[in-house]
Amino acid sequence: MTDTTPGTLPRIAWIGLGIMGSPMSENLIKAGYPVTGFTLEPDKLGRLADAGGTAAESVADAVRDADVIITMVPASPQVEAVAYGDDGILAHARPGALLIDMSSITPGTSVGLAKAAAEKGVRVLDAPVSGGEAGAVEAVLSIMVGGERADFDAALPIFETLGRTVVLCGPHGSGQTVKAANQLIVAVNIQACAEAVVFLEKSGVDLPAALDVLNGGLAGSTVLTRKKDNFLRRDFAPGFRIDLHHKDMGIVTDAARAVGAALPVGGLVAQLVASLRAQGDGGLDHSALLRSVERLSAHGEAAA
Ligand code: NAD
């Protein structure tokens, strides 16, 4: 059990307070961790302060006194900007600090970051997550970690405050490789669910009843549980943006090509995600893959 006596928990700097970072950092605050945060939107900094955290004025200001620095930003370029910039983490973190990058980025970027940070005496873990906004709010994320065992053990109380399934997958970059596989499975699953929805509706079947019974059998999935209402209500407020899933399909197809693994269905779904984005739906939740199936089948609102 984590000791929650004030002053005994590591001081945390949290960079990136978006859809995921805000609820995750708030769960650490609730568990008693002192959290200082920085992000680009002033209203998100206000939310952190309201939750009991401290709003910093810059990355440098946030990380200077931190024992643990957590980044949760969109993609590799933002991780590199907050890590390597003049105002960034490596220029201002204390030697001995632990940097945990929880963003979903290319495995190669994680490996490069670990190497550069080691030269400054900063330890690094890649620790991307799965479970979506609801998983972040409910602190039930799956956390897939790459790095050294000793650093993983040191970070475990923090991970267990944020998630339920926490696994060290291997050396630096391994967490990102596993996350890439996760995004492949999720995208293909959403696409299959979306195709089933259009097929069922066009067949005149009671859709809520059909999805309930499907979810109780082998076709059931966390995707169907979490996204069922999005499909039924055509509610595509994010959640997880198509723009981010497009980024992740690029990561998994590149990583698979590098090791000579063929992803025939993944490649197809990557193209469908790219097409949805090209049609202006990049800001919608990834359950909006349904809109693309509707267009292909001349069905529903998206096809009108
Ligand atoms: P988001 O766009 O909602 O939030 C990103 C945050 O990063 C923003 O608050 C932004 O201000 C901040 N940021 C960007 N550049 C910055 C900089 N230079 N300095 C400081 N802050 C900066 O994104 P999100 O949905 O929270 O996703 C974050 C990461 O988590 C992504 O890599 C995403 O792929 C991954 N992820 C998201 C979900 C989800 O359901 N949303 C689920 C699992 C993993």
Image: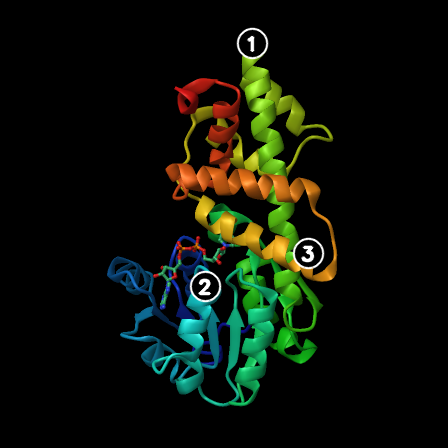
Mark 1, other Cα within 10 Å: few <14 / some 14–19 / many ≥20: few
Give amino acid for label 2: Met
Q: Secondary structure at mark 2?
A: loop
First reached walking from the N terminus: tag 3 or tag 1: 1
Q: Is residue 140 visible?
A: no
Q: Secondary structure at mark 3?
A: helix
Pinpoint residue 77: horizontal percent, then vertical percent.
44, 66
Give amino acid for label 1: Gly
> Quick check: marks 1 and 2 in contact, CB under 8 Å?
no
Mark 2, residue position: 72
Give amino acid for label 3: Ala
Pinpoint residue 90: horizontal percent, then vertical percent.
45, 83
Mark 3, other Cα within 10 Å: few <14 / some 14–19 / many ≥20: some
Mark 1, residue position: 204
Q: Does any atom of ligand 1 lie closer than 8 Å to the CB of label 2?
A: yes
Q: CA distance from mark 3 to mark 1?
A: 40 Å
Q: CA distance from mark 3 to mark 2?
A: 24 Å
